[in-house]
């Protein structure tokens, strides 16, 4: 039996459309807010249809020397062209991209995870220096 963490797949986001791309400064100032953008399909587009789409992105920060990570945010994408007319007949779609701001007093690692409704769990990470 696999451990839950082993269900998270990863790869280079430039060649695998399911891997969250984390865009933020590699170096930040202690205690100052900085922008973080997390998206999927930055190089290779991921579908966004009623049948195949990204359900959510969750972002965490593990500060150096701390025992546990903190969740920075969780973002649900709820509109994928559903309609009473049928699948993909609606005109409303949420795009799987989020922007947030955060601050930290310590260096650490941002972890992003995402769920594709048919291709499972994916994750990536980016180191932040302070
Ligand atoms: Fe997918």
Image (tube, rainbow, N blue to C red):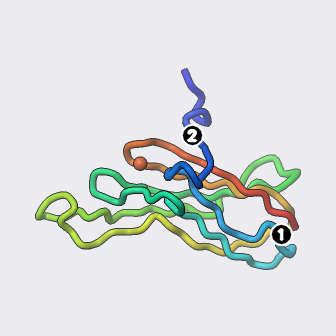
The answer to whether residue 37 is left or right of residue 64 is left
Label 1 lies in ligand 1 vicinity (Cβ under 8 Å): no
Secondary structure at badge 2 equals: loop
Residue drawn at the location 83% of the way across and 69% of the way down? 27
Where, quadrant-wise, is the N terminus in this rendering?
top right
Q: Where is residue 101 shown, x and y percent of the image?
A: 67, 75
The answer to whether residue 68 is left or right of residue 40 is right
**Separation of disc 1 and disc 2 at Cα?**
27 Å
Number of numbered discs visible in the structure rendering: 2
Q: Where is residue 49 shown, x and y percent of the image?
A: 30, 58
Is residue 62 visible in the rendered image? The answer is yes
Residue drawn at the location 80% of the way across and 68% of the way down? 104
- Front residue of 63 and 39: 39
Q: Where is residue 47 shown, x and y percent of the image?
A: 37, 57
- Front residue of 49 and 60: 49
Residue drawn at the location 69% of the way across and 53% of the way down? 125
Label 2: which residue? 9
Label 1: which residue? 27
């Amino acid at each position: 039996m696999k451990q839950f963490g082993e269900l998270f797949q990863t790869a280079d986001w430039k060649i695998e459309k399911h891997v969250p791309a984390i865009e933020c400064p590699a170096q930040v100032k202690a205690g100052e807010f900085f922008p973080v953008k997390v998206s999927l399909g930055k190089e290779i587009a991921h579908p966004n249809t009623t049948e195949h789409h990204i359900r959510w992105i969750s972002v965490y920060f593990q500060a150096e020397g701390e025992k546990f990570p903190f969740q920075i945010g969780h973002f649900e994408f709820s509109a994928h062209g559903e309609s009473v007319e049928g699948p993909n007949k609606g005109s409303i779609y949420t795009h799987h991209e989020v922007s947030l701001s955060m601050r930290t007093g310590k260096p650490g690692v941002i972890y992003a995870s995402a769920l594709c409704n048919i291709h499972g769990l994916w994750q990536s990470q980016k180191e932040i220096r302070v």
